[in-house]
Amino acid sequence: MAPNRNLQRLHEAGVSIWLDTLSRELIEGGEFAALVADYSVTGATSNPTIFAKAITSSDLYDNQLRALVSGSQRDPRELFFSLALDDVRAAAALLRPEYDRSAHADGFISFECTPDLADDTEATIAQATDLWQRLDRPNVMIKVPGTTAGLPAIEELTRRGVNVNITLLFSIERYERVIDAYLRGLTARAEAGAPLDAISSVASFFLSRIDTKVDEQLPEDSPLRGQVALASARVAYQRYLAKFAGAGWERLESLGARRQRPLWASTGTKNPRYSDVLYVSELIGPDVVSTMPEQTLRAFADHGEVRSTLDADPRRAQRALADAQTAGIELESLTTELEREGVQAFCDSYHQLLDCIESKLGAVSAA
């Protein structure tokens, strides 16, 4: 099969295309490798919701689970790590050629710290460091939520040389603080004489959830419906360009440091009135990542159009956010609410996952 032209052109426009799902079925069935070969996929992400679905709906994990149990391992969290980390290593191996080809700029797979640690800085640092060491792959990123507690964790993990994917970002102000934490971590590492050239990071800005929340507060005929998330992303991109410029950044860059790329997450369109590729086609520009569920990826492959849309009119994006405030949308409180809801949703999925593993323990033990 020839590479899909729409996705190839998207990649050529500077967008790294990452798949927003991971499962053993996808890897062992060959579909993941096919998406890398034919759909210009150069990375992937996972989260507790994704793994809960993968492990719950498949028996491909049962033999490994049976072997782990026979070896006296019965802690559900450790069983989850054993199952999931094998999938992450397998995905990392499939993406390693892209990591090498791109001179370590792409080809990453992300794995998330457990969401119950989202408000615990020290526990996040300890678990992220442990996961990084256990995975032992240069093209892995550890996902850390961009909560208040996550900020010092991002700085410290960067100082330690851990690749970090900062997740659950909704606020432009919080995004700026995430960049600052990354820069402080790089600076501390440079001052200690440690190398910077092997460190990569992305900051994941969640999109469709913003519009879902905002649209609930707007009249049906409001021109702002379906626009606030895009405006937020475009303003965030301008902050990215500004932060990674100037003498301070140039000094770090001369030592091998890489920019922390913006990543567009939650790109699956939730409102059926909107284009099914809205959050991909309207945020195309250089040096960004777009992580897509498989349905969105295939939709863009079918009818996506590639044109420069991310920084065409920055002032228009600023006006849209100002108009939203005028319309009564309190973006600061709304994004705080979205962060809390996101953490809770991942916690719910994580506990569902542990319950699923516990229930499978009985089944595989009896088999």
Image (cartoon, rainbow, N blue to C red):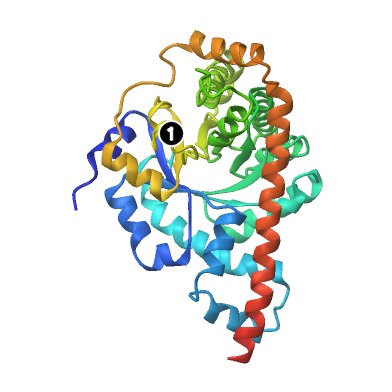
Q: What residue appears at the point 43 percent right and 58 percent down from the top-left corner?
A: 93
Q: What residue appears at the point 37 percent right and 47 percent down from the top-left corner?
A: 98
x then y, percent, for residue 352: 67, 63
Q: Along the line of sight, which residue is nearer the eye, 236 or 272? A: 272
Residue 297 image-quadrant placement? top left
Considering every residue shown, the one lying at the far bottom of the view is 367
For the question of whether residue 308 can be seen, the reply is yes
190 horizontally vs 4: left or right: right
Residue 55 image-quadrant placement? bottom right
Q: Is residue 203 above or below residue 89?
A: above
For the question of whether residue 100 can be seen, the reply is no
x then y, percent, for residue 22: 48, 57
x then y, percent, for residue 300: 33, 39
Q: Along the line of sight, which residue is nearer the eye, 154 or 322? A: 322
Which kind of residue does numbered mark 1 sit on?
Answer: Arg
Identify the secondary structure beneath mark 1. Answer: loop
Q: Is residue 79 above or below residue 254?
A: below
**Residue identifier under label 1:** 273
Quadrant where the image shows the C terminus = bottom right
x then y, percent, for residue 267: 48, 38
Q: Is residue 359 above or below residue 124?
A: below
144 horizontally vs 287: left or right: right
